[in-house]
C-alpha cells in the first residue's frame, strides 16, 4: 500500500465517521405544547409538564424515538384561552414541531380544536372536558380518564341516591369547565329521578361564600354537587365549616377542582374529611400498575427542585401516560405520520402507568376510570399523610373501589 | 325563594363582607383618592403583604394580624421608595404623568406577581389562627369569626386614619396637598415629601389589609386581578379621598352583593356592584362623600 492509498483510506474512514456521526446527529423529534405556568391553572400545568418531562428523559435514555432524541417545545399560555391559538400557530409554522400535546385544562384547549381539525393534526388532549363534543375531530385523544360526558356527575349522584338522597343542590363556577360539568349533572338528575332544589352559578371572582352557603342551606338538599375551581373550592369548604350545611345532607362534593392539589389539601387539612370528590389517580391498592411506583419515585425527587405539587397524583402520571401512548404508536408504526399514529391509538389498548387505556369514537376513554373518593381521617398540616392508602378511599367505580361511602356528610366529617 | 331570615343573614354577612372590602380599599383611598396617583398596583402590593404574613405565620408561627402589624413598617418604606421612583420617572416630567403612570404601576404589579411566583410557586397559601374556621352562633345565625375580625380591624383602620388625617399636623398637610399643591408650595412646604409620606402610609396600611386578605381566604399570586375592579369601585363610589366614605361605600357594596348572592342568584353579583357605582355617580358625580 503506497502513501496515496493510505491517504485515500484515511479520507474514506473520516468520511464514514462523519456520515455515521451525521446519522447520530439527526434532528430531534419536536413535541410542541403550551402549558399554563402562570395564572390560575399554573399549579396543575407545572405538575403536568413535569410528568411529560420525566417521560421525555426516560424515552431519551432508551435512545429516543426512531433513533432521534425527543425535544419538548413549551410556551406559557398564562392559563388564558386567548393565548393558545397564536401559540399553536407558532409551534406549527415557526418551530415546525412534529407532534402536538394540548395544554392542561379545558379553557386553554378549547380554542385550538378548530385549528388542529382544519390542519388534520393529531392532538393528545391533556385533562380537558368535552372539548371535542362539538368539533368531532377524529385525531383527538384525551389522556384524562373521564370517559362518557356524564361520568363525573353520574358516579357522584348515583352514590347520593343509593345513600337515600332525593333532592339535589347544584353549585357551580360560572365558567366553561364547571358549566359543562353541571349541565351533565342536570341531565343525570332527570335520568335517575332526583329533584333539583337549588341551582346557582357564581362568578369566578367571588371572594366570600358565606351568603351562598346560607342560601343553599335554606333549600335543604340531600345531595350537594359542587363544580368549582381551586380558589373557590377552598373558600367554599371554609364557609361550609363555619355556616354549616345541614344534617340532611347525605353527600357533599362532586367536581371540586383543587382538592387534588397538595398545597390546597395541606391548607384545608381536616376540613376535607367527609367530602366525596372526583379524582384520577390515588395511592390506593387498586391503582398500582407497571411503572407507577418508579414514576412517583422520580416525580417526588424532581417536584421539590421544580417547586411543583409535591404529591402530583392528579395530573403528572397522566402526562407521562400521554407520552407512553405516543411512544408506543411511533414505535409500532415506525413513522411520524399523523394519520397512521391516530389510527394506531384509536384501534389499540395502551398499557400505561395509569392502567390500560382504550379510546371511544369521540377520543375519550371507552370506559370511565374517574374516581369518586371520600376524604377520611385527615389531620391538619401534614402533606405526607396523603401518600398512604386510606386517606382518600375510592367509593366509585366498583371495579376500583377500596371502601364504602360513609354517610351522612356530618357523620363522615368526624372520620 | 324569599324569607326574612335569609334577608337578615344576607345583611349581616354583607356588612361584614363590606368591612373587609373597606380594609383592602382604604390604602387606595389615600394613594388614588387623595394623591391622584393611578396606583393600579395597589392590589398587587396587597397580595404581596399577604405572602409576607404567610411567611411569618408558616415559618415563625406568628399570628396573622400581628404579622400584618410587623410588616407594616417595611411596607411603609416600600411605599416611600415606590412613590419616589414614580415621581422621578413620571410625575415630575409632565402633565400626562397620570396616563403614563398607569403603565408604570401595571409594570410594578407584573413584577410583584412574577417575584411571588418565583419565590413561593403558583400554589395557594393560607394561614392558621385560632379564629379561622370557627363561627359565632347567634340563634340560628352563624357568623364566621374571621369575618368579625375583618369587621373590627376595618373599623379600627377607618377611625384611626380619619382621625390622623383630620387631627394631626401631618394629616392636615396630606389633605392640603390633595386640595392645592401649589398653595402648599407657596407656604414653604415640600408637597413631594408630603405626598411621599402619604403614599408610605397608604402602603403601610396594606400590611394589615394583606393579613385580612389571607385570613378571609387563601391567596395565590394572581389574586390581585380579582380585587383591582372592586377596590377602585369602592374608592370612586366613596368619593375620592374620603376615608369614612370608603367604609360606607364598601358596606353598601358588601350588603348588595350579599343580598344578590343569597336572594337572586350569584351570577348577578358583579353586575350589581358596578350598576351601583354607575347609579351613585349619576346622582352624585363626586361620589358619596366626595368634595
Image (spheres, coloured by chain):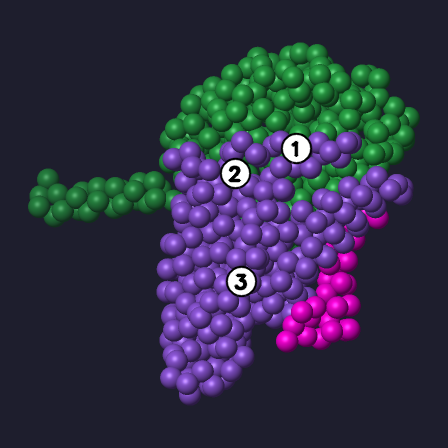
Chain colours: A green, B purple
Residue B126 tag number? 2
For the question of whether residue A17 can be seen, the reply is yes
Number of numbered tags placed on the structure image: 3
Q: Which residue is mark 1?
A: B135
Q: Chain of mark 2?
A: B
Q: Chain of mark 1?
A: B
Quadrant of the snapshot with the N terminus of chain B: top right
Q: Reading the chain from its start, which is encountered first: label 2 or label 3?
A: 2
Q: CA distance from mark 2 to mark 3?
A: 32 Å
Q: Secondary structure at mark 1?
A: strand
For the question of whether residue A347 can be seen, the reply is no
Q: Is residue B148 left or right of residue B179?
A: right
Q: CA distance from mark 1 to mark 2?
A: 18 Å
Between marks 2 and 3 in the image, the one whose residue lies nearer the viewer: 3
Front-lying residue, A31 or A128 = A128
Furthest-bottom residue in this view: B186
Q: In the rendered structure, are the residues bearing label 3 and label 1 in contact, judged by CB atoms less than 8 Å apart?
A: no
Image quadrant of residue A256?
top right
Q: In the rendered structure, are the residues bearing label 2 and label 3 in contact, judged by CB atoms less than 8 Å apart?
A: no
Q: Is residue A31 left or right of residue A304?
A: right
Q: Chain of mark 3?
A: B
Q: Residue at x 44, y 48 (%)?
A: B69
Furthest-left residue in this view: A3
Q: Which residue is mark 3?
A: B163
Which segment did they paint magenta? Answer: B264-291
Q: Position of residue A196 (x, y in %)?
A: 87, 33
Q: Secondary structure at mark 3?
A: helix
Amino acid at each position: 500500500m503506497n502513501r496515496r492509498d493510505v491517504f485515500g483510506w484515511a479520507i474514506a474512514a473520516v468520511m464514514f465517521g462523519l456520515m455515521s456521526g451525521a446519522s447520530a446527529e439527526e434532528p430531534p423529534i419536536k413535541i410542541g405544547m403550551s402549558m399554563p405556568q402562570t395564572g390560575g391553572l399554573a399549579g396543575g400545568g407545572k405538575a403536568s409538564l413535569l410528568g411529560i418531562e420525566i417521560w421525555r428523559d426516560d424515552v431519551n435514555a432508551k435512545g429516543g424515538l426512531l433513533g432521534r432524541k425527543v425535544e419538548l417545545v413549551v410556551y406559557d399560555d398564562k392559563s388564558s384561552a386567548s393565548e393558545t391559538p397564536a401559540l399553536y400557530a407558532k409551534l406549527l409554522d415557526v418551530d415546525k414541531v412534529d407532534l402536538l400535546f394540548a395544554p392542561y385544562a379545558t379553557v386553554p384547549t378549547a380554542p385550538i380544536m378548530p385549528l388542529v381539525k382544519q390542519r388534520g393534526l393529531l392532538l393528545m388532549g391533556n385533562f380537558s372536558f368535552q372539548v371535542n363534543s362539538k368539533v368531532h375531530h377524529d385525531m383527538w385523544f384525551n389522556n384524562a380518564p373521564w370517559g362518557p360526558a356524564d361520568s363525573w356527575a353520574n358516579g357522584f349522584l348515583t352514590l347520593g341516591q343509593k345513600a337515600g338522597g332525593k333532592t339535589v343542590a347544584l353549585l357551580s363556577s360560572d365558567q366553561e369547565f364547571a358549566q359543562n360539568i353541571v349541565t351533565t349533572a342536570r341531565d343525570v338528575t332527570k335520568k335517575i329521578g332526583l329533584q333539583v332544589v337549588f341551582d346557582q352559578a357564581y362568578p369566578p371572582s367571588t371572594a366570600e361564600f358565606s351568603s351562598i352557603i346560607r342560601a343553599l342551606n335554606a333549600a335543604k338538599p340531600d345531595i350537594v354537587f359542587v363544580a368549582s375551581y381551586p380558589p373557590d373550592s377552598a373558600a367554599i369548604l371554609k364557609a361550609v365549616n363555619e355556616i354549616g350545611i345541614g344534617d340532611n345532607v347525605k353527600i357533599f362534593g362532586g367536581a371540586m377542582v383543587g382538592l387534588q392539589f397538595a398545597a390546597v389539601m395541606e391548607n384545608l387539612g381536616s376540613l376535607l374529611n367527609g367530602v366525596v370528590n372526583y379524582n384520577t389517580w390515588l395511592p390506593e391498592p387498586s391503582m398500582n400498575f407497571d411503572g407507577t411506583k418508579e414514576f412517583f419515585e422520580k416525580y417526588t425527587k424532581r417536584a421539590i427542585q421544580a417547586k411543583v405539587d409535591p404529591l402530583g397524583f392528579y395530573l403528572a402520571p397522566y402526562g407521562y401516560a400521554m407520552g407512553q401512548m405516543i411512544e408506543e404508536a411511533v414505535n409500532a408504526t415506525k413513522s411520524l405520520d399523523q394519520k397512521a399514529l391516530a389510527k394506531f391509538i384509536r384501534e389499540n389498548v395502551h398499557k400505561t402507568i395509569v392502567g390500560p387505556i382504550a379510546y371511544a369514537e369521540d377520543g375519550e376513554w371507552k370506559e370511565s376510570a374517574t374516581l369518586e373518593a371520600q376524604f377520611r381521617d385527615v389531620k391538619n398540616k401534614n402533606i405526607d399523610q396523603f401518600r398512604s392508602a386510606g386517606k382518600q378511599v375510592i367509593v366509585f367505580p366498583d371495579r376500583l373501589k377500596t371502601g364504602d361511602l360513609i354517610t351522612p356528610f356530618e357523620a363522615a366529617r368526624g372520620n | 325563594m324569599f324569607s326574612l331570615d335569609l334577608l337578615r343573614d344576607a345583611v349581616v354577612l354583607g356588612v361584614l363582607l363590606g368591612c373587609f372590602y373597606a380594609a383592602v380599599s382604604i390604602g387606595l383611598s389615600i394613594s388614588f383618592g387623595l394623591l391622584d396617583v393611578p396606583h393600579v398596583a395597589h392590589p398587587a402590593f396587597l397580595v404581596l403583604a399577604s405572602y409576607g404574613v404567610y411567611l411569618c405565620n408558616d415559618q415563625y408561627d406568628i399570628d396573622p394580624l400581628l404579622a400584618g402589624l410587623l410588616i407594616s413598617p417595611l411596607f411603609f418604606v416600600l411605599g416611600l421608595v415606590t412613590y419616589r421612583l414614580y415621581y422621578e420617572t413620571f410625575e415630575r416630567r409632565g402633565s400626562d404623568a397620570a396616563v403614563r403612570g398607569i403603565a408604570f404601576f401595571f409594570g410594578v404589579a407584573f413584577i410583584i406577581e412574577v417575584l411571588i411566583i418565583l419565590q413561593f410557586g403558583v400554589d395557594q397559601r393560607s394561614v392558621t389562627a385560632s379564629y379561622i374556621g370557627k363561627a359565632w352562633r347567634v340563634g340560628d345565625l352563624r357568623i364566621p369569626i374571621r369575618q368579625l375580625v375583618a369587621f373590627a380591624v376595618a373599623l379600627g383602620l377607618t377611625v384611626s386614619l380619619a382621625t390622623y388625617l383630620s387631627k394631626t399636623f401631618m394629616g392636615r398637610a396630606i389633605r392640603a396637598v390633595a386640595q392645592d399643591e401649589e398653595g402648599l408650595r407657596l407656604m414653604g412646604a415640600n408637597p413631594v415629601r408630603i405626598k411621599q409620606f402619604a403614599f408610605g402610609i397608604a402602603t403601610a396600611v396594606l400590611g394589615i389589609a394583606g393579613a385580612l386578605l389571607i385570613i378571609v381566604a387563601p391567596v395565590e399570586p394572581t389574586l390581585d386581578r380579582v380585587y383591582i375592579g372592586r377596590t377602585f369601585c369602592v374608592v370612586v363610589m366613596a368619593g375620592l379621598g374620603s376615608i369614612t366614605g370608603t367604609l360606607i361605600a364598601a358596606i353598601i357594596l358588601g350588603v348588595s352583593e350579599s343580598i344578590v348572592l343569597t336572594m337572586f342568584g350569584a351570577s348577578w353579583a358583579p353586575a350589581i356592584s358596578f350598576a351601583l357605582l354607575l347609579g351613585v355617580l349619576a346622582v352624585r358625580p363626586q361620589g358619596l362623600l366626595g368634595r
